[in-house]
Amino acid sequence: MSSMERLLQAQESESGEELYSLDDILNMPTDVIEELLEENERLKRQRASVRFREFKVLSEKPQLVLDCIEFLRKNNAVYQEGLFRIPGTNSVVEEIRAAYEKQEYDDVLSIIPDTDANVVGTTLKGYFRLLDSPIIPNETYEEFMEVAEDMSGSGGPPTPPQLTAIREKVQTLPSPNKEVLCYLMIFLQEVVAQKDINQMRPQTLATCIAPSLMRFTGETKKETGKMMALVELGYSIKILSIMLSDIDFMEIVTKEKYEDMKKATKYQLRGAPQLEIPAGAAASAGVPPPVPKRAPRGGAPPGL
């Protein structure tokens, strides 16, 4: 088990529903910090050497993304403990990536043996990590960092203006980035809805996903650069946690567009789902949960 996994497990048991603060990130154990920064550097090198046609957002319907989400949903993976935190078998992940690149099969995830939820979750994260340009472009990333810095200075939960700012920045993303991000986030909110079962609370899932969607840009070869990279990582986790908890992505992408994207999947469930729906599940898989409206300080819930 890696240092990061040990930290996440400890945070899951101790932090409840609180979002990570910047202090939480800056006070991470040294080995966790080093692991995060080394992983960022490794991914930079990997992006420089790996060029899959499929690993580019060429349209509103990237097949790998649609198929992976449909696989996870139809196999009840939203109930699996540690989804997106526990890595899948690397050799199977690489075989899936190669199959999408070569476009050998229509239903890749049904053809390749040993394809399970952790493999598909790792493949999905890898898609976004290996994009030539992150799905949240640099200019929008910088704007998110400004909102996070403002929240860090004020303390407490986000205010209605801060939530509105986050929502507006998602709305102004270029196509197809906006549509693909919304489709992904709707599914991730389904995962969070089962947090009592899968132990993936907003801040835990955000810690696992943020580096794939919102890349920190600090130069990690110098100590000052490491600190900046860590600050930006903390801000990214905070923004993504709020997105998972408070933003209605279905409203942004529209139900019609969402259903159109969903129909484009080529994955077909063959036989019984890999996981059974556990007793006491909060909602049915495949039904996007309602986004709770966070009560702002001293006012009515914001109309997001």
Image (cartoon, rainbow, N blue to C red):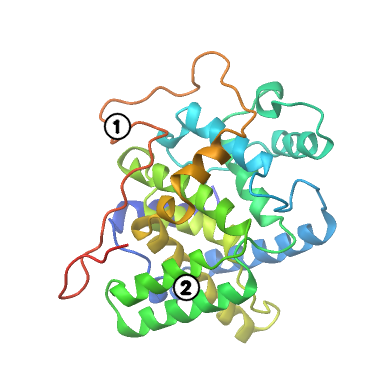
- 199 relative to 44, above or below: above
The amino acid at mark 2 is Tyr
Gap in Å between the C-alphas at discs 1 and 2? 31 Å
- Residue furthest toward the front? 256
Q: Is residue 238 left or right of residue 193?
A: right
Q: Which mark is residue 281?
A: 1
Identity of the residue drawn at 39% across and 71% down: 24
Depth check, front residue: 218 or 255:
255
Identity of the residue drawn at 39% across and 83% down: 150
- Residue 297 position in % (x across, y down): 19, 74
Q: Is residue 203 left or right of residue 222?
A: left
- Element carrying mark 2: helix
Residues packed near mark 1 inside 10 Å, few (<14), some (14 to 19) or many (20 plus): some
- Residue 15 position in % (x across, y down): 30, 59
Identity of the residue drawn at 50% across and 22% down: 274
**Residues under numbered marks 1 and 2 in contact, where contact means CB atoms less than 8 Å apart:** no
Q: Which residue is mark 2?
A: 235
**Residue 117 shows up from this direction:** no
User: Quarter of the image containing the C terminus?
Assistant: bottom left
Depth check, front residue: 163 or 117:
163
Q: Quadrant of residue 113?
A: top right
Q: Which mark is residue 208?
A: none
Q: Quadrant of residue 165?
A: bottom left
- 155 relative to 186, above or below: below
Along the polypeptide, which appears first: circle 1 or circle 2? 2
The amino acid at mark 1 is Ala
**Residue 237 shows up from this direction:** yes
Depth check, front residue: 233 or 13:
233
